[in-house]
Image: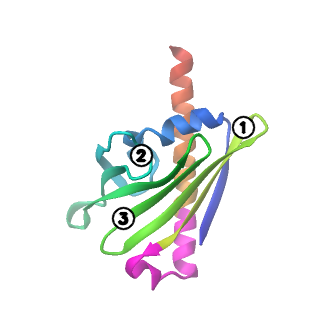
């Protein structure tokens, strides 16, 4: 199981503004090349972000579906990565003084990815999620700075 967290100098609502913007996912989710569409009502359970990942002949088009949404503290997603299967991605936004801790818990959920779930896969997911959290922090801080200029 790959669990990673980061302290972000923001409020839960400021982080949630990015999590609830499906079109922003290409800016912070590692491996996402483009967002093709976002279902109306995102991130309510059952709605999806439709994305492209990879490059050239390795490019895939798939979706990530919201399974649980408790604004502004909890978002659980099922990321489809066919033919590999799906991943469960749980994002928690926890108040920490004047800041927040964002925790990502990601692990295989369905399909062949369950068979290859091992410490090496967990390590690679941990590295990916470290970068993902840095990207999320950058997008959140950019949004805060943009709002402050308005």
Q: Residues within 10 Å of mark 2 (few under 14, many from 20)?
A: many
Q: What secondary structure is marked by label 2? A: helix
Q: Nearer the viewer, residue 110 or 41?
A: 41
Q: Is residue 59 above or below residue 74?
A: below
For the residues marked 1 and 3, what is the alpha-carbon distance in whole angstroms? 31 Å
Is 21 displayed left or right of 134 in the figure?
Answer: left
Q: Residues within 10 Å of mark 3 (few under 14, many from 20)?
A: many
Q: How far across and down, in percent of the image, does residue 21 sit?
A: 43, 38
The quadrant in which residue 23 appears is top left
Whether label 2 touches label 3, CB < 8 Å = no
Of the image marks 1 and 2, the number of the one nearer the N terminus: 2
Q: Is residue 14 above or below residue 106?
A: above
Q: How far across and down, in percent of the image, does residue 35 sit?
A: 31, 46
Q: Residues within 10 Å of mark 1 (few under 14, many from 20)?
A: some
Q: Nearer the viewer, residue 28 or 13?
A: 13
**Which residue is pictured at 53% across the width and 21% down the height?**
147
Question: Residues in magenta?
Answer: 109-127
Q: Which residue is mark 3?
A: 80
The quadrant in which residue 105 appears is bottom right
Report if residue 58 lies within the magenta region: no
**Which residue is pictured at 30% across the width and 48% down the height?**
34
**Which residue is pictured at 38% across the width and 56% down the height?**
64
Could you say which disc has been placed on residue 99 in the image? 1
Q: Which residue is mark 2?
A: 25
The quadrant in which residue 81 appears is bottom left
Q: How far across and down, in percent of the image, does residue 53 sit?
A: 31, 58
Q: Is residue 29 above or below residue 72?
A: below
Q: Colour scheme used in the picture?
A: rainbow
For the residues marked 2 and 3, what is the alpha-carbon distance in whole angstroms? 15 Å
Is 58 displayed left or right of 98 in the figure?
Answer: left
Q: What secondary structure is marked by label 1? A: strand
């Amino acid at each position: 199981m790959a669990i990673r967290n980061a302290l972000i100098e923001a409020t839960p609502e400021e982080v949630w503004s990015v999590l609830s913007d499906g079109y922003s996912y290409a800016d912070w989710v590692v491996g996402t090349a483009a967002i093709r569409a976002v279902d109306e009502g995102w991130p309510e359970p059952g709605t999806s972000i439709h994305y492209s990942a990879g490059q050239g002949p390795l490019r895939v088009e798939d979706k990530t579906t919201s399974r649980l949404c408790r604004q502004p503290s909890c978002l659980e997603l099922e990321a489809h990565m066919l033919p590999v299967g799906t991943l469960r991605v749980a994002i928690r936004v926890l108040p920490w003084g004047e800041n927040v801790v964002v925790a990502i818990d990601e692990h295989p959920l369905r399909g062949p990815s369950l068979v290859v779930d091992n410490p090496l896969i967990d390590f690679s997911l941990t590295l990916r999620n470290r970068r993902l959290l840095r990207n999320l922090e950058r997008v959140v801080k950019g949004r805060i700075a943009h709002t402050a200029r308005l």
